[in-house]
Image (cartoon, grey):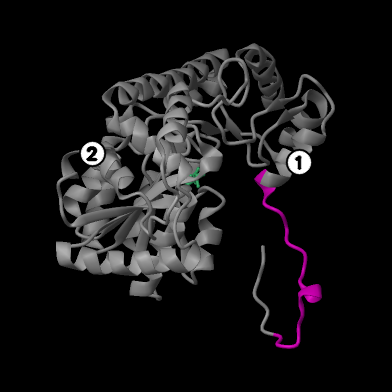
Amino acid sequence: MLTRTDAKARGLADLPPVKSDSLIALIGMVNADPRSDKIDVGVGVFRDGAGNTPILKVMKEAEQRLLDTQVTKAYLGSAGDKRFAELLRPILLGEHAGDQRIAGLQTPGGCGALRLGFELIATANSQARVYLGTPSWPNHAPIIRAVGLETAEYPYYERGQGTIRFEDMIAALRSAEPGDVALLHGCCHNPTGADLSEEQWAAVRDVVVDRELIPLIDIAYQGFGRGLDEDAFGVRLILSACDEVVIAQSCDKNFSCYRDRVGSMWVKTGAAKTTATAMGHVNQRSREMWSMPPDHGAACAHIILEDPELHARWLVELDAMRDRINSVRQRLASADPRLAFIGRQFGMFSMLPLSVEQVLKLRTDHAIYMADSGRFNVVGMSDEQIGRFTAAVVEALGA
Ligand SMILES: Cc1ncc(COP(=O)(O)O)c(C=O)c1O
């Protein structure tokens, strides 16, 4: 990671090397492996039964419509495509869609939304500490540190048991100071797949309210877990109880348009007027960082969501992605009692209780690539590869 140096005389040639992100390094290793039967469950993209990440059919159609009908590429402004954000409102916010204290804008993917959310928090309170689950998505901590905020940890997952360390999580959040931030995964927890139950969400809500914390909810996989509305349960429950909420949302997965960078960021405060002021800051930060988000992917999502027929077809394609995720989960879970926990989890990721040595042995002996932590993408493998993957993992787990 790049750490700032304050030595004034230093030039670019003196920069220390950056330790590359381990998941990016893993992609390099997979590409360099000449074995034709290699299995890449490291990368975080949806793959279908044939092992491909196809462009959704509705997305292709929307792209064609965009090509045929777009008449200008003039600037849109730092909030991007405002209609895109409006169309997302009911999908994300449900019964809160009409709440004028909540405002949102388009961002470059979920990463852009997270960065913007933390920029806003840091602008309001540079002393806020961000409580982050252990483990969490590896890019969370760097984004938080990049805006100058401090992180604190709450225990989240017991890898050996496949369960959430809920009491420890609550105890850690109880120790937070008013104004601190609780970073929560809306659904399909990355890297563990272990989602909070409805009762657990209610308990988290109570602590957040009691301790006057600001919840920042990262929802990157809505529709990949139980369903679009079901996956937004936590977001909506927290919105019901809290006056100050930040939400970072990604459309890159549920529209399967990863490299097009489609997402949104949402702010709720206690009054429409203060939300408007907060959005003024958000727009200013957006302008400083990327001026305006890339248009193409959001313009296509806009076309899809605006058109009832395309919208319905998107839901069908989204259902098919979710069905594959959940059916592969069931197949893995039924292969061995020690893998049963995978069937109780959601989204693309779970963590195998393997040591780093065991993970490395899977790479060497079986050309199976997953993160050192044992995190793997349940739909990283094709249908044909599932049997070989499961046999190798069961062998690695030992007798
Ligand atoms: C939990 C989580 N949040 C945010 C993101 C960022 O999503 P995007 O690719 O839209 O920036 C990811 C992507 O892997 C993620 O897993």
Q: Is mark 1 within 8 Å of ligand 1?
A: no
Is 47 rendered above or below residue 151?
above
Q: Which residues are magenta?
A: 7-23
Residue 328 left/right relative to 199 = right
Is 342 rendered above or below residue 67?
above
Q: Residue at x 48, y 50 (%)?
A: 294
- Return the x and y of residue 350 as percentages of the image width and height: 53, 32
Dominant secondary structure, magenta = loop
Q: In front: mark 1 or mark 2?
A: 2
What numbered label is drawn on residue 28? 1
Q: Residue at x 60, y 26 (%)?
A: 380
Residue toward you, 205 or 216:
216
- Return the x and y of residue 52 as percentages of the image width and height: 61, 22
- Return the x and y of residue 365 as percentages of the image width and height: 81, 26
Residue toward you, 227 or 67:
67
Residue at the disc numbered 2? 90
Residue 37 left/right relative to 209 = right
Residue toward you, 12 or 239:
12
Judging from the image, what secondary structure is the residue with disc 1 in? helix
Q: Would residue 163 be seen by someone viewing this image from the given angle?
A: yes
Q: Residue furthest front?
A: 71
Check residue 9 for magenta coloring: yes
- Return the x and y of residue 58 as percentages of the image width and height: 42, 24
Check residue 282 for magenta coloring: no
Q: Residue at x 49, y 52 (%)?
A: 111
Give the amino acid type for the residue marked by disc 1 in the picture.
Gly
